[in-house]
Image: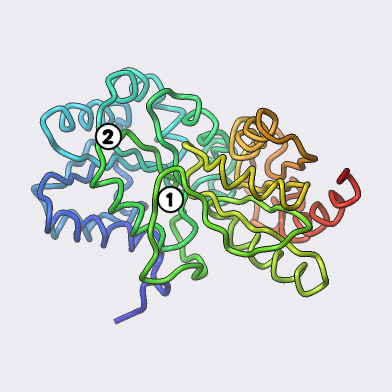
């Protein structure tokens, strides 16, 4: 049997839902005609047909069905492409989920540039921002399969509306079977005293590699991975900023309103230091490769390295 980290993220999403359903029949899987893309068809639909609801090409209806199930004591996981799971259904989420403080879990698949082949219409760079701005909503982004599994288990055990990004393909191993997830807690992946590097989700693998390279060249990086974008671990962030005096953030998102904005808000109110935000610079996407988009928007590994080196000159 393949090791967990040898599997696609969406395969582990489906496998974990099956495991949760076996111990808690209240867990439900809802899809809007994208179950094959999410990995739940046929893996979940065949294994637990009574816990699977196909809503068709009707994402707004899927959210409302999920809200109704939650009111009856079910724990619905509603998945779709991140653009459809956030932008298209924002009003339904606002009223039927967040305003009602209803226990619905929303999963936005293929976030940011991982939607490369589908282009700008499907390439959602603002889901973290718009979901973070919603009262009562938690916002998460796991960096590997082990953290994904821990996150799903926590989500299923909590009575909390939540939005989670889900990268669909394989991601490099960051954690192991002992991985845990706690809302509002960051994970220190590397320790250093020269610069703080803050990442989440898809970008953490690149941030880790950059931190290793910089450390080998004499620049100590304090690497904070933030799987919980809201609530944010302000205590860990401030402690790191006090140690290093300079912060770089990187995310697979628009730099307006997402992780970078959350970090700026937290440090602006608690411990101002020089900050450089990396990500999409307030633009739409296009059909392109990962490398092309990294270079165009200047947030790939070499840009993270350059930003960490440059910000050292801005320290007081």
Q: Is residue 297 above or below residue 212?
A: above
Looking at the rendered structure, the secondary structure element under dot 2 is loop
- Residue at 10% x, 30% y is 72
**Nearer to us in this view, 305 or 217:** 217
**Counting other residues with Cα less than 10 Å from the Cα at mark 1, is it few (<14), some (14-19), or many (20 or more)?**
many
Q: Mark 1 points at which residue?
A: 166
Residue 145's spot in the image, x, y percent?
Answer: 41, 63
**Which quarter of the picture shows residue 268?**
top right
**Which quarter of the picture shows residue 40?**
bottom left
**Nearer to us in this view, 138 or 128:** 138
Q: Earlier in the sequence, mark 2 or mark 1?
A: 2
**For discs 2 and 1, the disc positioned in front in the rendered view:** 2
Q: Is residue 237 above or below residue 40?
A: above
Residue 237's spot in the image, x, y percent?
Answer: 61, 45
Q: Distance between the residues labelled 2 and 1?
A: 16 Å
Residue furthest right in the image: 313
- Residue at 41% x, 59% y is 147
**Counting other residues with Cα less than 10 Å from the Cα at mark 2, is it few (<14), some (14-19), or many (20 or more)?**
many
Residue 129's spot in the image, x, y percent?
Answer: 55, 31
Q: In what quadrant of the picture does the N terminus appear?
A: bottom left
Q: In this view, does 57 lie above or below 185?
A: above
**Rendering colour mode:** rainbow
How many numbered circles are shown?
A: 2
Q: In what quadrant of the picture does the C terminus appear?
A: top right
**Nearer to us in this view, 192 or 160:** 192
- Mark 2 touches mark 1? (CB < 8 Å): no
Q: Mark 2 points at which residue?
A: 104
- Residue at 64% x, 47% y is 239
Q: Is residue 91 left or right of residue 219?
A: left
Looking at the rendered structure, the secondary structure element under dot 1 is strand
**Which quarter of the picture shows residue 191?**
bottom right
């Amino acid at each position: 049997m393949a090791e967990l980290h040898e599997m696609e993220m969406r395969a582990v999403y489906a496998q974990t839902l099956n495991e949760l359903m076996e111990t808690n029949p209240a867990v439900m899987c809802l899809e809007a005609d994208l179950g094959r893309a999410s990995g739940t068809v046929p893996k979940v639909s065949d294994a637990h047909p009574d816990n699977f609801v196909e809503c068709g090409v009707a994402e707004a209806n899927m959210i409302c069905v999920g809200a109704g199930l939650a009111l009856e004591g079910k724990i619905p996981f509603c998945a779709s492409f991140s653009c459809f799971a956030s932008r298209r259904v924002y009003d339904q989420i606002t009223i039927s989920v967040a305003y009602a403080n209803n226990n619905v879990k929303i999963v936005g698949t293929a976030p940011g540039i991982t939607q490369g082949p589908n282009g700008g219409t499907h390439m959602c760079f603002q889901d973290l921002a718009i979901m973070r701005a919603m009262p009562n909503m938690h916002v998460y982004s796991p960096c590997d399969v082990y953290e994904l599994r821990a996150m799903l288990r926590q989500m299923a055990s909590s009575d909390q509306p939540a939005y989670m990004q889900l990268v669909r393909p394989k991601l490099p191993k960051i954690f192991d079977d002992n991985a845990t997830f706690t809302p509002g807690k960051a994970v220190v992946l590397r320790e250093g005293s020269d610069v703080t590097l803050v990442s989440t989700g898809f970008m953490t693998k690149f941030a880790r590699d950059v931190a290793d390279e910089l450390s080998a060249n004499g620049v100590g990086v304090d690497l904070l991975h933030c799987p919980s974008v809201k609530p944010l671990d302000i205590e860990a962030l401030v402690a790191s900023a006090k140690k290093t005096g300079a912060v770089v953030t990187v995310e697979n998102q628009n730099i307006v309103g997402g992780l970078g904005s959350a970090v700026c808000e937290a440090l602006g109110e608690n411990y101002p230091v020089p900050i450089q935000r990396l990500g999409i610079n307030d633009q739409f996407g296009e059909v392109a490769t990962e490398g092309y988009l990294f270079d165009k928007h200047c947030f790939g590994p070499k840009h993270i390295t350059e930003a960490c080196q440059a910000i050292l000159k801005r320290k007081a």
